[in-house]
Image (tube, rainbow, N blue to C red):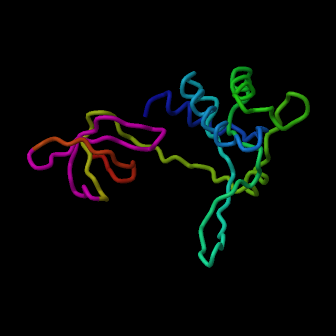
Amino acid sequence: MTDKVESREKRAINAKWYVVHTYSGHENKVKANIEKMVENRGMRDDIFEVVVPTEEYMEAKGGKKKLKERKLFPGYVLVKMIINDESWYLVRNTRGVTGFVGPGSKPVPLTDIEVKALGVQETILPSIDLKTKDVVKVISGPFENFMGTVDNINLEKRKVKVYVSMFGRETLVELDFDQVEKL
């Protein structure tokens, strides 16, 4: 694993959840805008996750039941981040954001108990000891028992692209980390 990935994982442990106030109805746009700006400005080491808390419910209409989703806290978005001047500025100046929840302009992090109560699951990312050109065996899915060579690793999506030999040709397939094992 590279030093950059290790430092990001160590930083993620120190990150806290903050509540951001948005215009009502703009929560998903704000989430998408923050994620896009984080990617564009290379701030993945400061801002780790953006969540719009939702819940599913059944709606009965005309004798038919339909599963729907609604926002738990309209007008609010949760952001897991390490607060510094740059990360604060990026979130605060995202279109649709009116500010952080907290006194004045100082964001107050949520406690672990509050985060659990909000139903935000911590994403525990399993580490993977792969690099390009490694030979792997597919251990599950439609390509089970195929051997292949790693072409690309996407740590964010937890996916790996592998060239497998199929019908006498090399074919690039995308697999989850838990679908392959290193040989």
Q: Is residue 103 above or below residue 17?
A: above
Residue plotted at (20% across, 45% down): 164
73 and 183: which is toward the camera: 73
Is residue 173 left or right of 58 when viewed as pictured? left
Residue plotted at (60% across, 67% down): 67
Per the rendered image, the range of residues in magenta is 142-168
**In which quadrant of the rendered image does the N terminus lie?**
top left
Q: Residue farthest to the right?
A: 103
122 and 182: which is toward the camera: 122
- Magenta segment: does it hold 160? yes
Residue 84 % position (x, y): 73, 24
Q: In which quarter of the view is residue 78 placed?
A: top right
Q: Residue farthest to the front?
A: 62
Q: In which quarter of the view is residue 105 placed?
A: top right
- Magenta segment: does it hold 180? no
Residue plotted at (40% across, 44% down): 159
Q: Is residue 68 above or below residue 2?
A: below
Is residue 67 left or right of 146 when viewed as pictured? right
Residue 135 % position (x, y): 24, 42
Residue 21 % position (x, y): 79, 38
Q: Residue farthest to the left?
A: 168
Q: Is residue 94 above or below residue 48?
A: above
What count of labels does the image hold?
Answer: 0
Residue plotted at (67% across, 47% down): 52
Residue 32 % position (x, y): 60, 37
